[in-house]
Image: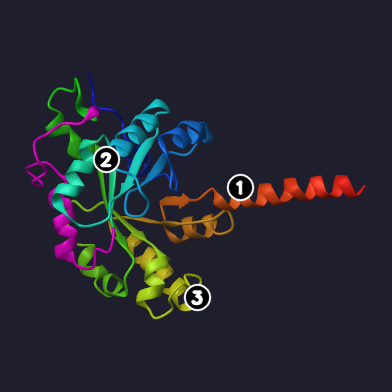
Amino acid sequence: MDIKTNRVKHKLDNGQVATVLLAELTADLIETFGRLGFDGMWIEAEHGSIDFQQVRNMTRACDLWDIASVARVHANIPGLIYRTLDQGVQNILVPHVNTAEEAYAVVDAAKFPPIGHRGNYTSRQGYGVEDYVLKANDEVIVGILIEDIIAINNLEDILTVDGLDLCFVATGDLSNSMGYPGRPEHPEVIKVRNQAIEKIAESNKIAGTVTTEKDVGEMIQMGARLVTTGYQSWVEEGSAKYLREIKNSIIK
């Protein structure tokens, strides 16, 4: 039995754009949304209330649709990183990584030897797979969030870290660190985000960011290759249209 293919990673390796649905999802929602055509589903373990058992069930739901699981953990802690991978997660993202040393620590925790020091343990992705430990490193994307102005200032050094695959630029906390709290759309924040994406794209790393249907094309042209989007706006717009139609029908 061969190791399960990481759909997001293989699309990126082939120079394609990978799409990930980003929200506080559950296993049931992933089962429902799996048919939409996204390459991966976001597992939100930095914010929200999910535990390791829920992470495991969410990765099972991803496997049902042959889509990749992308988990954001809450801290740069070795045991947290590899335990999350042990639940069947295929791609890991660590928030608030601000230096090359911190980025190296992420790689060290997420990769088996000889690259890193991930504990010698399997996951559902490894059941029945011969030499899983030797193959797993090639099927895991190791990523960090660039979401502090300190990380922006250190980006050139961060991009030199071997084994780091993805730098995901997030404007929410970035705006806070730049002195524009709660204003991720501020022109200065957008300018810094765009410059970071271009710099990441020019390196040998994958650039990722949050997008909408309005700016996803621009982000791809800029160099982003892992693009995420939420579904909340679709629900809000669809609900408003539906309720408006009802109101108009009653008035008539």
Please determine whether, in this image, residue 220 is positioned above or below residue 69. below
> In the rendered structure, are the residues bearing label 3 and label 1 in contact, judged by CB atoms less than 8 Å apart?
no
Residue 211 or residue 240, whichever sits in front: 240
Magenta stretch, residue numbers: 95-124
Q: Main secondary structure of the magenta part?
A: loop
| Mark 3 vs 1, N-terminal side | 3
Q: Disc 2 on helix, strand or loop? A: helix
| Mark 2 vs 1, N-terminal side | 2
- In the rendered structure, the answer to whether residue 85 lies left or right of residue 223 reads left
Residue at left offset 9%, top offset 40%:
119
| Residue type, numbered disc 3 | His
| Residue type, numbered disc 1 | Val
Where residue 218 appears, x then y in whole percent? Answer: 52, 60
| Mark 2 vs 3, N-terminal side | 2
Tell me the residue that label 2 is attached to.
Answer: 52
Q: Which numbered disc, 3 or 1, marks the residue closer to the eye?
A: 1
Q: Is residue 18 visible?
A: no
Tell me the residue that label 1 is attached to.
Answer: 235
Q: Which numbered disc, 2 or 3, marks the residue closer to the eye?
A: 2
| Residue type, numbered disc 2 | Phe
What is the distance, in whole Å, between disc 2 and disc 3 at their CAs? 36 Å
What is the distance, in whole Å, between disc 3 and disc 1 at their CAs? 25 Å
Quadrant holding the N terminus = top left
Residue at left offset 27%, top offset 64%:
96
Q: Disc 1 on helix, strand or loop? A: helix
Where residue 180 appears, x then y in whole percent? Answer: 43, 78
Counting other residues with Cα less than 10 Å from the Cα at mark 3, is it few (<14), some (14-19), or many (20 or more)? few
Residue 239 or residue 128, whichever sits in front: 239
Q: Residue furthest bottom?
A: 179
Counting other residues with Cα less than 10 Å from the Cα at mark 2, is it few (<14), some (14-19), or many (20 or more)? some
Tell me the residue that label 3 is attached to.
Answer: 186
